[in-house]
Image: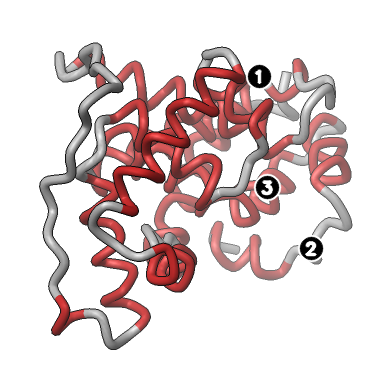
Amino acid sequence: MTTSAAASARPPAASDQDAIAAVLAGDPGAFAVLVQRHNQALFRACRAVLGNDAEAEDAVQAAWVSAYRALASFRAESTFRTWVTRIAVHEASSRLRRRARLSEVPLEGITMTATVSPERDAFSAELGALLERHIDALPEGMRTVLVLRDIIELDTAETAACVGIAEEAVRVRLHRARRALAESISSELVDRAAPAVWRFDGERCARVLAGVMAAIGATEGGGAR
């Protein structure tokens, strides 16, 4: 049976913890449940850091493999989504540093460079694309916090843990990111467009799932350790 067929044939787990328990008990195929459930959140987080779809997709796949290998260390002190999102943000940040683009960005005096295109805001997909352009215009640190809080909907403490900054710094960056967006795009439009930002489903989600399952199958002789 192919990876995608096996994943579709598997009944959905009742919870993340059920899937984790199955993997740790020696069923690596159960990891597909976690990948399918949280793939979009990880892609959005990586895309916020890296600013590039293809690089974000690669980072997501690498993050999932890292998460699988470290699964036995998950202690449920946070939600699995927070734990794996933190791994994804760290993976994306490492890639950003490796390409020598990570820099300290002052948080004061931020201005937006994107412009609204009124003729393109009639449909949901176009609204999402419009918001993506505005989010992309934010400095990386502000962009990542905004996406984690307002798109993925992590809370302040979870966001701070993912990014590795204090909760107060999360609040400051989020306030300034929202203010920067509000200067060039209405809050109503942001609310309408947010669900469409950097969607990650269909073929792309299936491609990452297949890549992750192939990677853990090729390197794993049993369950996660």
Q: Which quarter of the picture shows residue 219? A: top right
Q: Position of residue 205 (x, y in %)?
A: 45, 59
Residue under pointer 3: 34
> Circle 2 sits on which residue?
12
Secondary-structure class at tag 3: helix
Residue 63 in the image, given as x and y percentages of width and height: 48, 30
Q: Residue at x 43, y 28 (%)?
A: 173
Q: Nearer the viewer, residue 140 or 90?
A: 140
Q: Earlier in the sequence, mark 1 or mark 3?
A: 3
**Amino acid at dot 2:** Pro
What's the residue type where badge 1 is placed? Ala
Classed neighbour count for the residue bearing mark 1: other residues with Cα under 10 Å, few (<14), some (14–19), many (≥20): few
Looking at the rendered structure, the secondary structure element under dot 2 is loop
Where's residue 215, x and y in %?
A: 48, 35
Above or below 182: residue 77 = above
The secondary structure type at the circle numbered 1 is loop
Q: Which residue is identified by label 1?
A: 70
- Counting labels gives 3
Give the alpha-carbon distance from disc 2 to disc 3, as whole Å.
Answer: 10 Å
What mark, if any, has residue 49 been given in the picture? none
- Relative to 84, say whether 6 is above or below: below
- Answer with mark 2 or mark 3, whichever residue precedes in sequence: 2
For the residue pair 42 and 112, the one nearer the viewer reads as: 112
- Give, as a three-letter code, the residue at label 3: Leu
Q: Nearer the viewer, residue 125 or 156?
A: 156
Q: Residue furthest bottom?
A: 122
Q: Quadrant of residue 187?
A: bottom left
* Horizontal arrangement in the rendering, residue 73 relative to residue 54 (left or right): right
